[in-house]
């Protein structure tokens, strides 16, 4: 098989890149190691920045998002038992975010890809990438007992943190930066109306909690938990009891509970790999960087990488220019590091660390108090939360 761009991974990065390239008449094949149902079964992000909404529109897959997505103008910070609203729209001069699940984004992208008759190879085994330091890279994979090869001009490594793309780059060509946090997030999905209209990020002496949602009748809640916690140790009842203890009295009273439809634990990590281009191999999304979910930046960073990459590749084919390709890594990394900084800071402010202690708790509360009462500090939070502008030079 021959194509212009071979994309590894059918998560949001790979699917969105495929769609944007298709719109511009650039040929791409996606190779994914799991099944489509498995990819759709992963419960992940829930908050989209304007840049992501715009890109989904550009890709022609925004229609359902505009009908079903919920526009949020603010978030709530809860500390010392009280909720404080950050009015993001007012502070940023009109910016807002949208609550629309990653599962739905992925669904819309998969449907569009299928409707356009584009090739996605699901359940591809032993995917490997070759010769990306020369002019004729290839991708190999196994399917139905046979080995297949794709010849291409470029490889887009959109295969997430555990993918093969980054792992195939010689260690000497790669610099990685990592911070692992000493806790995880225990998440629960429930078919019940959310406890509040907007998200609540809670700092409590018992640890962090987050009240989020997917729609007006489906809620997503998270509790900070220890790294070695097991899902099996958490009955729904235990989860709701602990959540109530981390919320303000009004929220605790109005919390609508129900049987969980999903329960899982996610570790928290900051990770950046530099550079994000090696010859004709590009890394995009979680393949190149991971941020802790506090602040909801992961999916949005993935889409901004894809925005740069699609433009660079389209420029290469339409204008015979390598400028975008040459700047890809630098442009992405400037934005990546700012989101890494924001996610690290928001995580540090909201969670209980092993060494937080009574002093650390007081310092967090003082910073939160400053944050919600200083217009300058609130604006800095709001600007980062709604998403910083794309770097263009
Ligand atoms: P993905 O989604 O991991 O997709 C990568 C795909 O590559 C496939 N793959 C391979 N395919 C072929 N060959 C191989 N060798 C392969 N190895 C892997 C995988 O099967 C998969 O289908 O990466 P992508 O596309 O870069 O997308 C990134 C986002 O998924 C991620 O950043 C977000 O989910 C992070 N995140 C959030 N981001 C936000 O912007 N807002 C949020 O509110 C938000 N909440 C979250 C989150 C992530 C979470 N978890 C579980 C880590 C909440 C949670 C709990
Ligand atoms: C979610 O709804 O899954 C979610 C929302 C906001 C975050 C992280 C996760 O910061």
Image (cartoon, rainbow, N blue to C red):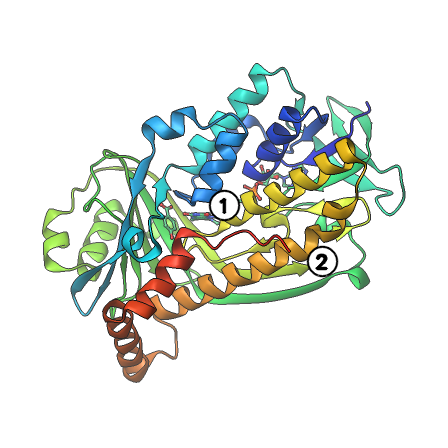
Q: At 30% from the left edge and 80% from the top edge, which residue is drawn?
A: 363
Q: At 78% from the left edge and 26% from the top edge, which residue is drawn?
A: 3
Disc ID at residue 299: 1
Local crowd size for mark 1, using a 10 Å CA cut-off: few (<14), some (14–19), many (≥20):
many
74 lies left or right of 160: left
Local crowd size for mark 2, using a 10 Å CA cut-off: few (<14), some (14–19), many (≥20):
some
Secondary structure at badge 2 equals loop
Quarter where residue 30 is shown: top right
Say whether mark 2 is within 8 Å of ligand 1.
no
**Disc 2 designates what residue?**
275
Residue 389 position in % (x across, y down): 50, 53
Residue 124 seen: yes
Residue 320 position in % (x across, y down): 81, 36
Q: 319 above or below 227?
A: above
Q: At 44% from the left edge and 34% from the top edge, which residue is drawn?
A: 103
Secondary structure at badge 1 equals helix
Circle nearer the N terminus (2, 1):
2
Residue 160 seen: no
Residue 129 position in % (x across, y down): 79, 41
- Which residue lies most toward the bottom here? 359
Say whether mark 1 is within 8 Å of ligand 1.
yes
């Amino acid at each position: 098989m021959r194509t212009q761009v071979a994309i590894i991974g059918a998560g949001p990065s790979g699917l969105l890149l495929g769609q944007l390239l298709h719109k511009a008449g650039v040929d791409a094949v996606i190779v994914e190691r799991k099944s489509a149902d498995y990819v759709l079964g992963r419960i992940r992000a829930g908050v989209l920045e304007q840049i992501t909404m715009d890109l989904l529109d550009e890709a022609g897959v925004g229609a359902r998002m505009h009908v079903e997505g919920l526009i949020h103008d603010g978030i709530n910070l809860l500390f010392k038992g009280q909720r404080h609203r950050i009015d993001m729209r007012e502070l940023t001069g009109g910016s807002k975010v949208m609550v629309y699940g990653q599962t739905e984004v992925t669904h819309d992208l998969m449907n569009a890809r299928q409707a356009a008759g584009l090739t996605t190879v699901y359940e591809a085994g032993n995917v490997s990438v070759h010769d990306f330091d020369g002019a004729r890279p290839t991708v190999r994979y196994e399917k139905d007992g046979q080995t297949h090869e794709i010849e291409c001009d470029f490889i887009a490594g959109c295969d997430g943190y555990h993918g093969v793309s980054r792992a195939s780059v010689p260690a000497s060509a790669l610099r990685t930066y990592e911070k692992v946090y000493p806790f995880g997030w225990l998440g629960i999905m429930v078919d019940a109306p959310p406890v509040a209209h907007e998200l609540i990020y809670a700092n409590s002496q018992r640890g962090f909690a987050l009240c989020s949602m997917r729609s007006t009748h489906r809620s997503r809640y998270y509790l900070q938990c220890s790294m070695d916690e097991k899902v099996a140790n958490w009955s729904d009842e235990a989860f709701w009891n602990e959540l109530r203890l981390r919320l303000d009295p009004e929220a605790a009273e109005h919390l609508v509970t129900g049987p969980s439809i999903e329960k899982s634990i996610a570790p928290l990590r900051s990770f950046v790999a530099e550079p994000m281009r090696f010859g004709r191999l590009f890394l995009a999304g979680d393949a190149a960087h991971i941020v802790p979910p506090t602040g909801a930046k992961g999916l949005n960073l993935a889409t901004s990488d894809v925005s740069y990459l699609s433009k660079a590749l389209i420029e290469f084919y339409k204008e015979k220019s390598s400028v975008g390709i040459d700047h890809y890594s630098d442009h992405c990394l400037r934005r990546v590091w700012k989101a890494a900084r924001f996610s690290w800071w928001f995580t540090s402010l909201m969670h209980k660390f092993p060494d937080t202690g009574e002093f650390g708790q007081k310092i967090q509360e003082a910073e939160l108090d400053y944050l919600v009462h200083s217009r300058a500090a609130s604006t800095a939070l709001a600007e980062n939360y709604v998403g910083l502008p794309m770097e263009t030079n």
